[in-house]
Image (cartoon, grey):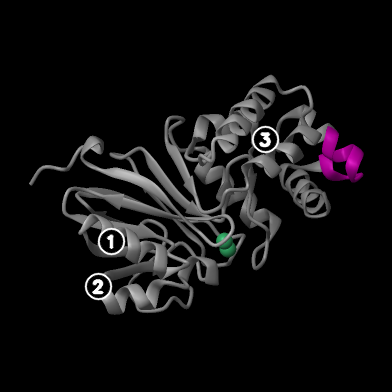
Amino acid sequence: MSLATASDLRIEPIPAYDDNYVWWLADGRTAVVVDPGDAAPVARRLSQTGLQLTAILVTHHHGDHVGGVEALVNATGARVFGPAAESIPCLRTRLKGGDRIEVLGHAFNVLDVPGHTSGHIAYHSESLGALFCGDTLFACGCGRLFEGTAAQMTESLAKLAALPGATRVYCAHEYTLANIRFALAVEPDNAQLAARKRACEALRAEGKPTLPSTIAEERATNPFLRCDVPAVRARAERESPGAAASTVATFAALRAWKNRF
Ligand code: ZN
Ligand code: FE
């Protein structure tokens, strides 16, 4: 059996709630969704396309990511993949870091990325050049620390930042412009960041998603991946004394600053 090439497969966002994206992956016959917080827009897409939903990939247990799972399973019988360490509706395949699954002819590696929640996982497909990272890494930002520590999140983000630069980042929320405003407060002189702001503003003005981004773009502009850059450390130190002591301390200071930004 040969693996499908990336061109066989379409990846599209289905908007849900105010700012969630349910990612839709489809070949000519079947579809898979990631983090269906709401069943209704997915059901509409299924009936519009006539495709069969075969699998649901879940990154973590929050309602805006799993709210549609049960209704979709009842309607389609799709198999649910998700984190072994969290309580996920209809979970059939329990995953942890190092596991490998095959979906739509593509292999996906499972990464443990605790921090936002303690059992959060991400899915990376080398053949697709795609990362589905839920609420861990956002475009120019990262998830809040609801269940994990700054040290855990720093390590999780480093794991994602180490993926190939061309990897497309499919995160679960359209938070990019707000994240860029914060990033510019951290690094006002980052020219790539300024360019990113203009590009993302243009996309939003046309009603288009700012996603996916790429790992290379995140490394260059996302302050939470740049906690070892001297200018970022120095800026964090000015905001909260002691923050320059380590990468984790800088991360913790930036995350706390963003929360009150
Ligand atoms: Zn979440
Ligand atoms: Fe979320």
Q: Report which residue position mark 3 lands on.
A: 226
Q: Report which residue position mark 2 lands on.
A: 76
Judged by its main secondary structure, the magenta piece is helix
Residue 230: where, in percent of width, then height?
77, 28
**Which type of secondary structure does the marked residue at label 3 adopt?**
loop
Q: Identify the residue shown where x is 27% and y is 70%.
A: 79
Q: Report which residue position mark 1 lands on.
A: 46
User: What crowding class fits label 1: few (fewer than 14 Cα within 10 Å), some (14-19), or many (20 or more)?
Assistant: some
**Left or right of residue 254, residue 170 in this image:** left
Q: Are marks 1 and 2 in contact (CB under 8 Å)?
A: yes
Q: Identify the residue shown where x is 27% and y is 76%.
A: 75
Q: Nearer the viewer, residue 246 or 65?
A: 65
Splitting the image into 4 quarters, where does residue 178 fall? top right
Residue 224 seen in the current view: yes
Dot 3 or dot 1, earlier in sequence: 1
Mark 3 to mark 1 CA distance (whole Å):
40 Å
Residue 142: where, in percent of width, then height?
63, 49
Say which of marks 3 and 1 sits in front: 1
User: What crowding class fits label 3: few (fewer than 14 Cα within 10 Å), some (14-19), or many (20 or more)?
Assistant: many
Residue 225: where, in percent of width, then height?
63, 39
Mark 1 to mark 2 CA distance (whole Å):
10 Å
Please name the amino acid that badge 3 sits on.
Answer: Arg
Q: Which stretch appears magenta? A: 235-244
